[in-house]
Amino acid sequence: MMISQFFVLSQRGDNIVFRDYRAEVPKGSTETFFRKVKFWKEDGNAEAPPIFNVDGVNYFHVKVVGLYFVATTRVNVSPSLVLELLQRIARVIKDYLGVLNEDSFRKNFVLVYELLDEVIDFGYVQTTSTEVLKSYVFNEPILIAPARLQPIDPAAIFTQGAKRMPGTAVTKSVVANDPGGRRREEIFVDVIEKISVTFSSSGYILTSEIDGTIQMKSYLSGNPEIRLALNEDLNIGRGGGGVSVYDYRSSSGSGVILDDCNFHESVRLDSFDSDRTLSLVPPDGEFPVMNYRMTQEFRPPFHVNTLIEEAGRLKAEVIIKIRAEFPSDIIANTIAVQMPLPNYTCRASFELEHDAVGQKTDFKETSKMLEWSLKKIVGGAEHTLRAKLTFSQEFHGNITKEAGPVSMTFTIPMYNVSKLQVKYLQIAKKSSSYNPYRWVRYVTQANSYVARI
């Protein structure tokens, strides 16, 4: 795989980092890319696709925390490989800088360029391993003070009792020590699940799937061996025709059943079949220990009901009801609900519950989109939105065919739907004075959460 250029742009289009490896693409490629992405209107799409071609130049990009990571080339390369490369470059830079934002880039541009020169040579990829790069990269990161960080998203705050736990995005560098030269002794394990659910118009579940990851980031000195124990009733590979490469199935056939999974190259599966433990020596940097997929029936965290009715010759009313199906000690954050309305909708007025706090509504007239955002939802709670629509022309036929479906995004800290659990985390380093922190966190997010009307 070969690329010609790599650059990072801010949301304003400012050039933060730029490397031209082969001098095959015009220098104005950054302006061409940003102008094309900002004003993309082809095929009726509002957003540019991750890959497009302008004047014979292929542009590949991913957006990470508001920054555009872009690669260009004139040759025919694998799109998935280039997009994966951009994601890995972002991850490596985050491992070194601790936090990924425009401020950290500008303060550490010398370190970033040194990383890029080791990752890519004359357009060819050399390595994207943080562990390997430690032998070749010698600049120390300039850490961003906590006060200079961007505001913390509520979804990244985890609470366990009265003790606040760090967010999923660990904002520490893997190569820098604490002030005073002390080495932090911590290890973070996140079980992150992205769920996809489709409801019928009557509220029944049509499809459901979980894409999960056990993510690890280690700050342990000496790279000690780690043992990670999962549920003893974990079964991998479903019966019948669909059997996983890792066909570890217990005779009980019950418990947590995953369709398939894959493991990081550092993971040893010697005892996984007998006691469901993973052994590994974690490399430096953030990496996925295990990726898994599950289509077994599960109880979705939210139930969504939608009703749309005619209310006159040029009027209609929409009712959206959300019910949280998780325990009352769990709180979901940053909930966003969207519903496409008929093209001839010209106005929408909203009615929320009398005690609604932290809720906002909006009607995007250009895209004909109804939007409803909720700051948080406590488990067991139910919330309702009523929207009165006004049309510019009389509708004909069934109005439900011209509206919807309702889509929803959310984040639920310290909750996972599959019930996959990290039972314990052992560190094979014997010392009376060695007592590192072990942070295990869970988070559920919406990948595709849709309710038909």
Image (cartoon, helix red, strand yellow):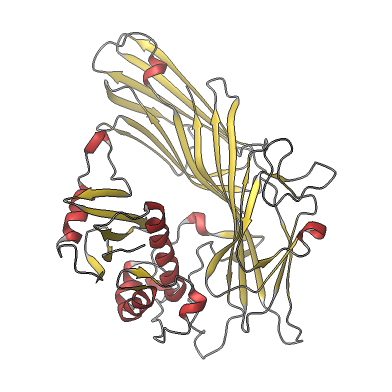
Q: Residue at x 24, y 33 (%)?
A: 366
Location of residue 16 with respect to 180 vertically, above or below = above
With 426 as the anchor, is 14 left or right in this view? left
Location of residue 396 with respect to 322 vertically, above or below = above
Along the viewing direction, whichever of 422 and 236 lies nearer the viewer: 236
With 244 as the anchor, is 374 left or right in this view? left
Location of residue 39 with respect to 138 vertically, above or below = above
Q: Residue at x 55, y 35 (%)?
A: 197
Residue 445 in percent (x, y) is at: 53, 47
Which residue sits furthest right? 251
Q: Residue at x 70, y 48 (%)?
A: 419
Report which quarter residue 262 is drawn in.
Answer: bottom right
Report which quarter residue 337 is drawn in.
Answer: top left
Taking the image as drawn, is residue 415 in sight? no
Location of residue 345 with respect to 329 vertically, above or below = above
Residue 228 in percent (x, y) is at: 71, 65
Q: Quadrant of the N terminus?
A: bottom left
Q: Residue at x 48, y 72 (%)?
A: 129
Which residue sits furthest bottom? 180
With 39 as the anchor, is 441 left or right in this view? right
Report which quarter residue 288 is drawn in.
Answer: bottom right
Residue 96 in percent (x, y) is at: 44, 76
Along the viewing direction, whichever of 178 and 420 lies nearer the viewer: 420
Residue 327 in percent (x, y) is at: 67, 43
Q: How many numbered marks have been drawn onto this rendered protein structure?
A: 0
Taking the image as drawn, is residue 221 in sight? yes
